[in-house]
Image (cartoon, grey):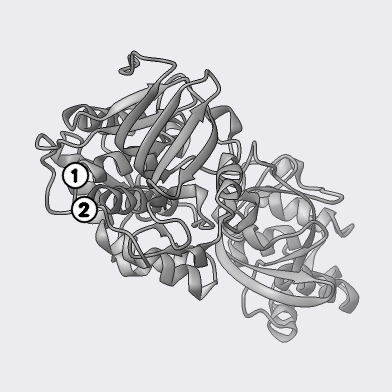
Amino acid sequence: MEDPLKSPGREERADVLILGAGPAGLMAALGAAGLSASNFDLSRNRKKILLIEKMPKPGRKLLIAGSGRCNVTHAGPIADFCAHYGRDAGKARFVKPALMNFTNQNLVAFLAARGLPCVELNDGKIFPRSENSRDVLRVLLEACEDAGVQFLCGEEVTALSRNEETPVFEAKTRSGRTFQAEKLVCAVGGKSFPTTGSTGDGQIFAQAFGLPFVELRPALTPVTVKAYAFASCAGIALPETLVTLWRSGKKLAEHRGDVLFTHHGLSGPGILDFSRDFLPGDELHLTLAEGLEDAPLCALLQENPQREIGNLIRTEFRLPDRFVSELLRSEGLPAEMKAWEVTKKTRKTLLKLLKDFALVIQTLGGFREAMVTAGGVALEQVNRQTMESRRVPGLYFAGEVLDVDGDSGGFNLQFAFSSGLLAGQSAGAGQTGA
């Protein structure tokens, strides 16, 4: 996009200044221009809305969402979404106003109205029918063009300040430009996938205004496992597996979801959605046969004396053959062992494997592997009804720059869209105060 500002060296003014042209920033621009759940007409916008993006083009991270297919949101009642942002009840309360203001159904309707219908696939995940993230970005950019939003790409904001007397925000860029606005929306993202421009700038900007900031860490990330013996099982998934987290001999939490074996450890929704709670050295206990006890296992072996234990376990508990072979081998048990050969000691080993298969986390994936970022601007300092800072009037936050991280399956993109829209609406309407 062309730079619409032709006067470097002097101050440029805007009604609303937005930092970051990801999904939250783009929706903030549309919200400031008048987009709402009931109004998709942006042609009447008269505000000067300027969106500054440090990357050469907008929407870099959106393009890789859902492996390029762009899982924009999830199906189901929007009220159910609140439970998908961790176990902290405070976060559930925080995300609710934004989600209710612009729901998953509103998002789907908006995209459809702009010529991009969506479809529900894969356990409630919603994608554009084209399954192409470029189409989602195109819709957002075309809507911004209709609203007269101005873009300035390839410019990195290096300093922010606010004149308390005016009051006006001032943003200085690395090239020496200065931009001013009475309303400022910070939607610069987190720190995951830094090649897309997410490099943790939110912390610098929050500190510029003295706002508390929760340390950034990778979320929705795979893990590597100590003494991993299942590299040959890479690609195998265990559906809807109960995973229990243990630390220093104490059970901390449990989660259920698909577990995927990789070349170096574990991934899949059952791990990714749980990873915000992990630390290196933690134990993950997988329940492979729920409800199994010693007596039923003993009876099963006695009733099938000539069956090989590998084949018996695979068929009885519906586990992949290759995984069962490696599982038994990890305890020095041959899959070809006949059931009648199983001793009491071996039976206890089998029971432990099937009920409480333990793996020790060696490392968590870093920001290059993590799908999203945990941590960010502390939520208690942000008005959830408007996304405005409680300390700095006229300053709004949206998307991943906030201390909000959701489960996989479209929950993070929905919050980015919803919080971005609410922040933009509030800034465009001039709403301030707590």
For the residue pair 342 and 137, the one nearer the viewer reads as 137
For image coordinates 36% across by 69% down, the residue present is: 80
SS at mark 1? helix
Disc number at residue 163?
A: none
User: In the rendered view, would you say 165 is above or below 68?
Assistant: below
Callout count: 2
Could you tell me if residue 212 is visible in this image?
yes
Q: Position of residue 238 (x, y in %)?
A: 59, 56
For image coordinates 74% across by 74% down, the residue present is: 301
Residue 405 vs residue 183: left or right?
Answer: right
- Residue under numbered circle 2: 106
How packed mark 2 is, by other alpha carbons closer than 10 Å (few <14, some 14-19, many 20 or more), is some
User: In the rendered view, would you say 4 is above or below 60?
Assistant: above
For the residue pair 129 and 345, the one nearer the viewer reads as 129
Q: Quadrant of residue 58?
A: top left
Residue type at mark 1 is Phe
For the residue pair 42 and 38, the one nearer the viewer reads as 42
Q: Quadrant of residue 246?
A: bottom right
